[in-house]
Image (tube, rainbow, N blue to C red):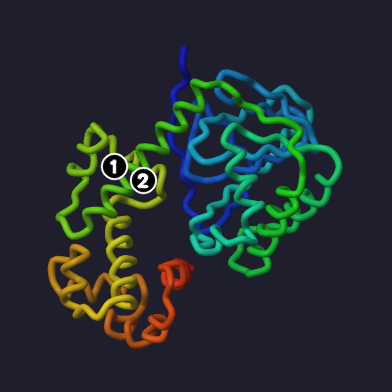
């Protein structure tokens, strides 16, 4: 009998260090998760396989990988296990695509089936985990990056899930998210609605809304507004179109609505944004510089 799968998307910007909470059902989310058992008695349920975790191990799970953690309630001492949730989109696509991040990105892509690390070098990573805390201090961002760098230099002890059924389910979820994102990106000028995009995935409106929020961490409406503002910011830097034309081109119903939504996200009006970024037009070979600047400003507004 298949276990029920439910969504789990904690509300945080870049990372969140949590103590394990036992769940009855398999869960999935849009975050990478690093699991660190600190005592015996923690079991990882991945696909149709159970893994008794040991102290000194680290398990890295990629997004959309259904799993469940259970605790041995019969131990004399309470079972202790940390889970570090983190997101790449908060770092900015330009940074994630950089040469410097390549080794880490490769390691993260290989964690689709669950990666187990143990042995020599693991103590350095445990030390960084001990220093991490849920704060907005920049040193915590450096701790996260340092942890990922050290982890990417290690050779995995093994990959946990080779079950084709599980991988297909994960891929199906990723494909659905990609289809929704691509449809939105290609139709920003249209009157986008939950019903319209849900129809592309052959899903009921309410089911799609829950699915979208669980996997992207924002509501459908919030996501569409952000994508329209992102595209508008690109046009403001790379074209000479009027501000009214740009607002219409990305789907805002009026100039006042465009100005309001743009300022609420980027803290400046479209006119002010264009004036302050006019130098970026020089020698633009790709949209990556623009995207990195937009991502930085969007991240700043969330702090």
The residue where tag 2 is placed is: 213
Which residue is outermost to the top? 1
Q: Residue drawn 36% across and 74% down?
A: 266
Circle count = 2
Q: Residue drawn 18% across and 43% down?
A: 196
Which residue is outermost to the right? 120
Q: Is residue 146 left or right of residue 93?
A: right
On screen, residue 150 above or below 47? below
On screen, residue 116 above or below 293? above
The residue where tag 1 is placed is: 209
Q: Residue drawn 84% across and 46% down?
A: 121
244 or 210: nearer the eye? Answer: 244
10 Å neighbourhood of mark 2: few (<14), some, or many (≥20)?
A: some
Residue 297 appearing in the image: no
Mark 1 and mark 2: span between their CA atoms? 6 Å
Q: Position of residue 107 (x, y in %)?
A: 64, 45
């Amino acid at each position: 009998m298949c276990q029920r799968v439910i969504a789990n998307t904690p509300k945080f910007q870049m990372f969140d260090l949590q103590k394990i909470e036992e769940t009855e059902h398999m869960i999935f989310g849009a975050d990478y998760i690093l699991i660190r058992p600190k005592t015996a008695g923690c079991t990882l349920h991945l696909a149709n396989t159970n893994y008794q975790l040991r102290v000194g191990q680290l398990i890295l799970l990629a997004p959309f990988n259904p799993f469940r953690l259970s605790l041995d309630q019969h131990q004399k001492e309470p079972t202790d296990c940390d889970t570090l949730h983190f997101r790449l989109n908060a770092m900015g696509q330009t940074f994630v695509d950089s040469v410097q991040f390549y080794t880490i990105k490769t390691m993260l892509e290989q964690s689709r089936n669950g990666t187990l690390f143990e042995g020599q070098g693991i103590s350095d990573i445990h030390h960084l985990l001990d220093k991490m805390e849920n704060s907005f201090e920049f040193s915590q961002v450096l701790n996260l990056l340092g942890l990922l760098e050290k982890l990417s230099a290690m050779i995995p002890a093994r990959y946990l899930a080779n079950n084709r059924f599980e991988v297909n389910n994960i891929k199906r979820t990723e494909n659905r998210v990609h289809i929704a994102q691509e449809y939105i990106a290609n139709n920003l000028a249209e009157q986008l609605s939950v019903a319209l995009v849900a129809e592309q995935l052959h899903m009921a409106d309410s089911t799609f809304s829950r699915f979208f929020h669980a996997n992207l961490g924002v509501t459908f409406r919030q996501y569409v507004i952000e994508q329209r503002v992102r595209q508008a910011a690109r046009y403001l830097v790379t074209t000479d179109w009027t501000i009214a034309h740009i607002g219409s081109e990305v789907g805002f119903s009026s100039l006042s609505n465009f100005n309001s939504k743009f300022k609420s996200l980027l803290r400046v009006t479209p006119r002010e944004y264009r004036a302050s970024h006019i130098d970026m037009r020089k020698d633009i070979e790709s949209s990556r510089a623009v995207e990195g600047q937009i991502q930085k400003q969007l991240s700043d507004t969330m702090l």
